Image (cartoon, grey):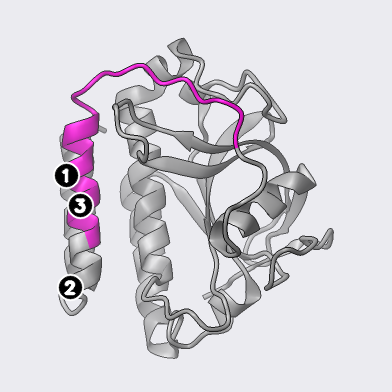
């Protein structure tokens, strides 16, 4: 699939679900614009050792707690087999550019000797969060196709990994179609984020994207809500819609 074909499909799917959600539409439009900007530019990238301690409690710290476990079992309640994951790296840019903050994948995991992308979401007790799984899903597939269509070879040539990563040397060109959206209990159980009327749309969206874009999107409840915490060693639970 060519990049232009991918962008057309993304915009078609976005229009189905963002007509009544201006913030989501603006978010997706911005991400699509990033495809043109970042994928047409080349700029050296060289990740340093990442900061193991987050400066604030929330999604970033939750992401780090997951990474610290090094290994997770993802209980595939909606599929036949569980997924055994070794966490390879964290917060890796998938584009080349001079900006300090660039589109970056939260986690890269390894399963069946293939790397895959994982997006992490977090809902705390007090902060209002307009984010829904729709944001995470579109973010995942956009990052996936930036890698697959535009930057995989360059990411490998530039050796884009942290020098202190758990697993160094995975090939970006071998990134699997498996895409994981992971979040804490409160995220999935918050009806402002996952209201009952969103579930049918979400199920249809995932089915459409899996078919049209040849990906395998899955949603998982990680567990503990409040970092600093120990992410449970028990398997993550798949969200079945």
With respect to residue 107, does 235 lie above or below?
Answer: below
Relative to 190, 39 lies left or right: left
Q: Image point 51% across, 15% down: which residue? A: 159
Q: Residues within 10 Å of mark 3 (few under 14, many from 20)?
A: few
Neighbourhood count class around disc 2 (C-alpha, 10 Å): few under 14, some 14–19, many 20 upward: few
- Res. 75 in view: yes
Secondary structure of the residue carrying tag 1 is helix
Q: Nearer the viewer, residue 169 or 235?
A: 169
Residue drawn 16% across the image and 44% down it: 33
Q: 194 or 42: which is nearer to us?
A: 42
Residue 219 visible to an observer of this rendering: no
In the image, residue 176 above or below residue 122: above
Q: Residue at x 38, y 88 (%)?
A: 197
N-term mark: 1 or 2: 2
The quadrant of the image that shows the N terminus is top left
Would you say the residues marked 1 and 2 are in contact, meaning their CB atoms lie under 8 Å apart? no
**Secondary structure of the residue carrying numbered label 3:** helix
Q: Are marks 3 and 1 in contact (CB under 8 Å)?
A: yes
Report which residue position mark 1 lands on.
Answer: 33
Q: Position of residue 152 (x, y in %)?
A: 40, 22
* Disc 3 from disc 2: Cα separation: 12 Å
Which residue is disc 2 drawn over?
Answer: 22
Q: Which badge, 3 or 2, is on the more N-terminal residue?
A: 2
Instruction: Residue 186: give x, y in percent of width and height.
Output: 60, 79
Q: Identify the residue under disc 3.
A: 30
User: How many numbered tags mark residues here?
Assistant: 3
Residue 173 on image: x %, y %: 47, 22
48 left or right, relative to 167: left
Q: Residues in magenta?
A: 27-50
């Amino acid at each position: 699939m060519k990049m232009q074909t991918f962008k057309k499909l993304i915009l078609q799917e976005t229009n189905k679900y963002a007509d009544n959600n201006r913030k989501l539409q603006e978010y997706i439009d911005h991400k699509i614009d990033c495809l043109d900007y970042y994928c047409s530019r080349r700029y050296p990238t060289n990740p340093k050792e990442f900061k193991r301690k987050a400066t604030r409690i929330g999604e970033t710290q939750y992401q780090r707690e997951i990474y610290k476990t090094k290994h997770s079992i993802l209980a595939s309640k909606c599929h036949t087999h569980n997924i055994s994951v070794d966490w390879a790296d964290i917060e890796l840019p998938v584009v080349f550019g001079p900006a300090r903050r660039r589109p970056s994948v939260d986690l890269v995991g390894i399963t069946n000797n293939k790397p895959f992308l994982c997006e992490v979401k977090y809902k705390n007790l007090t902060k209002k969060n307009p984010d829904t799984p729709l944001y995470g899903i579109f973010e995942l597939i956009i990052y996936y196709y930036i890698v697959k269509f535009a930057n995989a070879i360059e990411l490998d040539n530039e050796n884009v990994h942290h020098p202190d990563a758990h697993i160094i040397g995975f090939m970006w060109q071998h990134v699997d179609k498996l895409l994981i959206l992971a979040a804490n209990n409160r995220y999935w159980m918050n009806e402002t984020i996952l209201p009952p009327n969103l579930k049918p749309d979400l199920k249809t969206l995932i089915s459409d994207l899996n078919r049209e874009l040849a990906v395998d999107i899955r949603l998982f409840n990680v567990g503990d809500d409040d970092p600093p915490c120990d992410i449970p060693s028990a398997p993550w639970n798949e969200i079945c819609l």
